[in-house]
Image (cartoon, grey):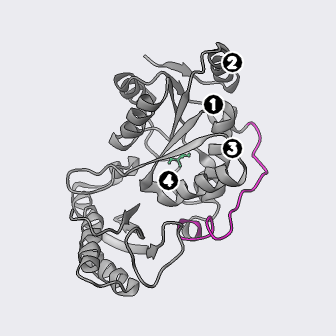
Amino acid sequence: MPRLFRRIKEIRGFIKDIKCGGNNVSVGLVPTMGYLHEGHLELIRLSKLQNDLTVVSIYVNPLQFGEGEDLDRYPRDLDRDLALCEEAGVDVVFAPDDEEMYPEHPNVKIEIPGLTDRLEGVYRPGHFNGVAIVVLKLFNIVQPNKAYFGEKDYQQLKVVERLVKDLAIPVETIPVPTVREEDGLACSSRNVYLSPEERQSASSIYRSFLLAQKLFQSGNTDAETLKQAIREFLLKHPHVRKIDYVEITDENLNPVNEVKEGDRILVAVFVGNTRLIDNWRISHEKV
Ligand code: PAF
């Protein structure tokens, strides 16, 4: 079983003792909100390859949920997560409660103009403020050498990378490619909300990326045309109820008009009542 810590003071003491041992132990942090899936396990596998000690944090961070979002029903099962962590060879799990993480509501606000106010930031105001606070706090508590983030949450990854750069935080962020189910749906803890029929329609997101990539590969580089093709394709599927956005940007999330290799398609789509986000790196590679 991994060592389980619920208190900041205790995990801090543990990490301090390990690092003070003088044998340069490297620590990898995998921050999660629990209900672990194959995407998280991939982050853990990489951390284990690259570090002496792997810490997984499990905390459903209320600060990153807006009003009317799914904070209360977000799936939680610590025993299941601990069993998966044990199987994956995780050394330490840090699973604080709200009282431990936020004895007082944090008053600090973190914004990165041009980054936190786009895409998800428009539809989920305050979301990245909450993500930034919890990630910085976890970095301060665990003091990892490396921290692992899935490309599935591409904007989140960019926000964390920017924080690390702007604030000279001594943590290397490691981006990890999105893990997909057999039919292409990106692994996400929120996939459990989907009914079997919705689950089938949800794979249209991946297929819309392939369609856009095919158009690109046949010489169509107009972003508007690709976005329109994606929208039309998605809305043809039952249960695809609403599209918050379909955007094509460069790798730093600046919207583009002319699409080139390495640009990203980013989408947020409601399938039934479940809001799914996903993204795709456009390339000339055959899939
Ligand atoms: O990606 C997530 O699961 C969360 O946003 C994170 C990084 C663990 C912060 O709560």
Category of crowding for the residue at label 4, using alpha-carbon neighbours closer than 10 angstroms: few (below 14), some (14–19), many (at least 20): some
Magenta segment, prevailing SS (helix, strand or loop) = loop
Closer-to-camera residue (229/20): 20
Amino acid, disc 3: Ile
Amino acid, disc 2: Gly
Residue at 59% x, 66% y: name it. Answer: 121
N-term-proximal mark, 4 vs 1? 4
Residue under numbered circle 4: 70
Q: CA distance from mark 4 to mark 1?
A: 27 Å
Residue under numbered circle 2: 13
Q: Any atom of ligand 1 within 8 Å of the CB at mark 2?
A: no
Quadrant location of residue 75? top left
Quarter of the image with the N terminus is top left
Q: In this rendering, is residue 137 above or below 26?
A: below
| Mark 1 vs 2: CB contact within 8 A | no
Residue under numbered circle 3: 169
Residue 157: image location, x then y, percent: 53, 54
Instruction: Name the side, left or right, on which 124 lies relative to 201.
Output: right
Instruction: Name the side, left or right, on which 180 lies relative to 135.
Output: left
Q: Residue 142: give its label.
A: 1
Nearest-to-viewer mark from 4 and 1: 1
Category of crowding for the residue at label 1, using alpha-carbon neighbours closer than 10 angstroms: few (below 14), some (14–19), many (at least 20): many
Q: Is residue 138 magenta?
A: no
- At numbered mark 2, what does the secondary structure look like: helix, strand or loop? helix
Q: Any atom of ligand 1 within 8 Å of the CB at mark 3?
A: no
Residue at 60% x, 24% y: name it. Answer: 6
Q: CA distance from mark 1 to mark 2?
A: 10 Å
Q: CA distance from mark 3 to mark 4?
A: 31 Å
Residue 7: image location, x then y, percent: 65, 24
Amino acid, disc 1: Val
